[in-house]
Image (cartoon, rainbow, N blue to C red):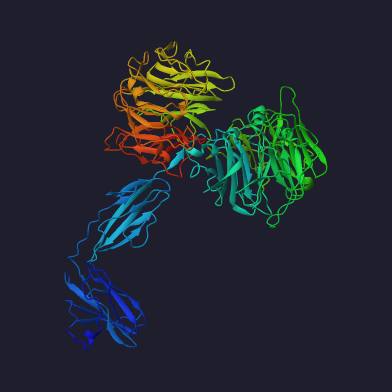
Amino acid sequence: MRILIPGLLLAFGASTAPLALAQSCGSGGGATVCLTATGTATNVQLGWTVSGNVTSLEIYRDTDADPSGRTRIAVPGSTARSYTDAAGSIGTRYWYWVKFTTNAGSYNSGSANATLGANCTPTAITPYINANGAWTQTASATIKTGASAILGPQPSSGGMWSWSGCGTAGAAREQTIQPPAACTATATYTNSCGAKTQQAFSIKVGSWTNAKFGGGGYVTGLVFHPTTANLLYARTDIGGAYRWHQGTSSWVPITDGLGFGAAEARHHGVESMAVDPNNDQLVYMATGMYVSEGNGRLSMSRDRGDTWTHAVLPFPLGGNNPGRAIGERLMVDPNKPSTLFYGSRTAGLWKSTDSGITWAQVTSLSSLKMTQDQINANGGTAMGVETVVYDTSTKGSGSATQTIYAAVAPDYANAAGLGSSLYKSTNGGTSWTPVTVPVAGYHIPHMARAADGMFYIAFTKDAGPGAGGPGRFYKFDGSNWTLLKSVDPIGGTNFGFGGVSVYGSGATTRIALGVTNSWGNWNGQQVVQLSNDAGKTWREIAATMPHSPDEGFAGWVDDVEINPLNPDHVLHVTGGGIWETRNASSATPSWTEPINGIEETAVLALATPPAGATYTVINSTGDVGTWVHTNLATKPTLTPGTSWSNGFSSDMAWSDPQYMATIGAVLGSNISYGYWSGDGGKTWAKFPTLAPGATANTNQEASIAVTARNKAVWAPGNSVPSYTTDNGATWVPTNLPAITGIYPRGYHLAADRKNPNKVYAYDSGGNWWGTPGKVYVSTDGGRTFTLSQGSVAAGLAPNYFANTSLVVNPNAEGELWLADGNAVYRSTDSGATWAKLSNFASIFIGNQWPQVQGATVIALGKAKAGAPHSAAVYVVGVVGGVWGVYRSEDAGATWTRFNDDAHQFGGIGVIAADQNIYGRIYFSGTGRGMLFSN
């Protein structure tokens, strides 16, 4: 039965056209009601919005858009906002209205229509993802860590979207996501008749991970926050800085990202760090690897090192110079934290009153800035003002601390005419007076203030690392000195004092004292001395105590720290990392290495085998030699066992990858070595003889190319390469030209993987002022070589060995790729001709040499499925003014950046690409060990 309500037509809203799922609105009496209708298989679902005040609602339905004769089907309450109509006929389209009443009268929404039931067909979804700046029709993608992607399925109009997973939310069709880990997002599309369709999007997140080695380098200092539990920073000499993560019991690198790229590699040398006692988010870091490189930099972070801002310092720093554990040189005034002091190596004491942005020399101590001649006379560096300590027990007062001590090294004191190694200010640094010290001509590597104001000060004759003695340890009350401990050269030993840390006050002050240059582990040895009575008595807590793993822990104990919130927790640094005990009060403290996450080896060369090999990569590294990785998550065990040594280069026979060879030099004795293995690195043997030139030249500008089992070509630094066909029993010089240079130089060698009779040699020219680069080609397994006239015609730029690279495509005979430091070249005819790729170019700023090299290292790895080229090509260089790792799938026609600003690692030195896994490269950062991409 149809009921006509007189006067109803006068109140219809303007939206009467049947627009599926769009809101249809009507207004009147100060209110507006907008209606939508959605048909499903069993009902029609109505929804509406109301603005203004309504006193009642009624729902009407009809089988056409004409409101005349419509039927009232429900009277919901005035607060209702939805209704489900299940009383219709399947397949019938219905029109709906909501009549609303206000104090001014009755009015209607616009009409909304939907079809009930069987004729509602789901709409297919077409998935699209924008993961690299362009849309791709796909339901899966891999993005870099920290990168974002846009999910944009189609159809683009006509229905409604809802989302779940991967951080999606709301009803927008396009969703921008930035997931921290792999995830799945689900899109649900509801079409105009109510049918739903779902589409899953699988997102994988690439990662940059260190291969496990553990430590491998010198941690020069540890800095605790004094009041926040477990907030601890570690600085290193070449590998940047780390923050301790208590939840994972590991260290987090904080100098891998923006501000630490190729142009900033020297800022992975950290000379000093400081925290603000009043703000545990604030940390400062002073960086610069060598005094000779020029002025250093102060980096400031307000989020514990996650991000940094930087200010140039007006003096040089030496994070990898001698004496690099001395300090801390940088200190924040605990009472007025915008005031900082810095003890520089060559230019005296400096002060900042604006949180490190600007600095002024404290000329009241000394105005001397050492000349280069003075620095050279001191061995090319200086110790300068070694540490700064505030004499206060308060913090946050707002007034600058007035009493300050500054320790001055003998080199700077002599050059500046200062009469003491310790100075005191009682007016915030305005003026300084010398403190009479009990011993003269000594360094003060560390001094610590106890809670009662007593100072505990180490004196040692040498600067370190692993400073030799004599050593003296005193307490100082501001006027009087009391000798607490001495070490003198005796019986072939030469111990000094390094790290000092204190806890508590008065007669029960706990002191931890590092004894340096004390190598070995025997009863009576001194490594870490502990006193619980302010220095009256001492006991050894490290030597002969349980250590896990059972590895060396003595020698460079140049910093020792007692946890300010847990005196049983004592840590000390070494040349290979960090050791700690958490039961220092025990009669036999147990020690472990908390180095998970610290990877500081200096990788010099990497080599990956063909697909299917029993190992992953051969890693030739400074200080620790060569290692064969079979599991990237555990420390490698396969090694020729050359101990303290530099591994220069390694290679394997491509058709027989169980055979491999490595070359390098033992440190200390400076003796070259060559080793081979025939079982994938499980066992090793020395080459019976060395290639000519290897004995006299132990520089790292060297390489080896293996052509087959027992056959190799060895290019020692500064030498003519030689070949062997009898596993190193004899070496025969090739006919390659002799190379000479003021700086170390050598040939890059590469064996053709498809035709081992072909061997390629590349002389990079020595340095940027050297001779143009040249390539030589052998077709008899490396016995004789012919100059590639094509390489001469290409005009290869002269450059240093480590800034250049020559590699082969393992999947194509005669395909060579070369980086001359500035550009990339490719040959497809075994070096006869070369084509220069226009993509890469160095960045020059005011000098004849680049500030950032345009192309330094190349690697070829497994190709992407369906790619037009047989190998994926990776280049470290500069494209469009942006440094990074770039990848090409089409033989260099196009390039995309492979890393991002968050993953720069202080620059990248060497790379190799995996032949099993697409998208995986192995590479070295600056002092960051071996890393790999997932």
Q: Is 68 drawn above or below residue 835 in the view shown?
A: below
Q: In which quarter of the image is the C terminus?
A: top left
Q: In which quarter of the image is the N terminus?
A: bottom left
Q: Is 450 drawn above or below residue 803 in the view shown?
A: below
> How many numbered discs?
0
**Whole-percent x, y for residue 480 in the image:** 83, 42
Left/right placement of residue 389 relative to residue 253 reads right
Left/right placement of residue 894 relative to residue 5 reads right
Seen at 17% across and 65% down, the residue is 119
**Whole-percent x, y for residue 292 in the image:** 59, 32
> Quick one: 366 or 614, which is closer to the camera?
366
Left/right placement of residue 383 relative to residue 452 reads left
Q: Can residue 692 be seen in this view?
A: yes
Place residue 290 in its image quadrant. Answer: top right
Q: Is residue 658 visible?
A: no
Seen at 29% across and 52% down, the residue is 128
Q: Which residue lies furthest to the right in this view?
A: 480
**Whole-percent x, y for residue 241 in the image:** 56, 41
**Whole-percent x, y for residue 910 in the image:** 44, 31
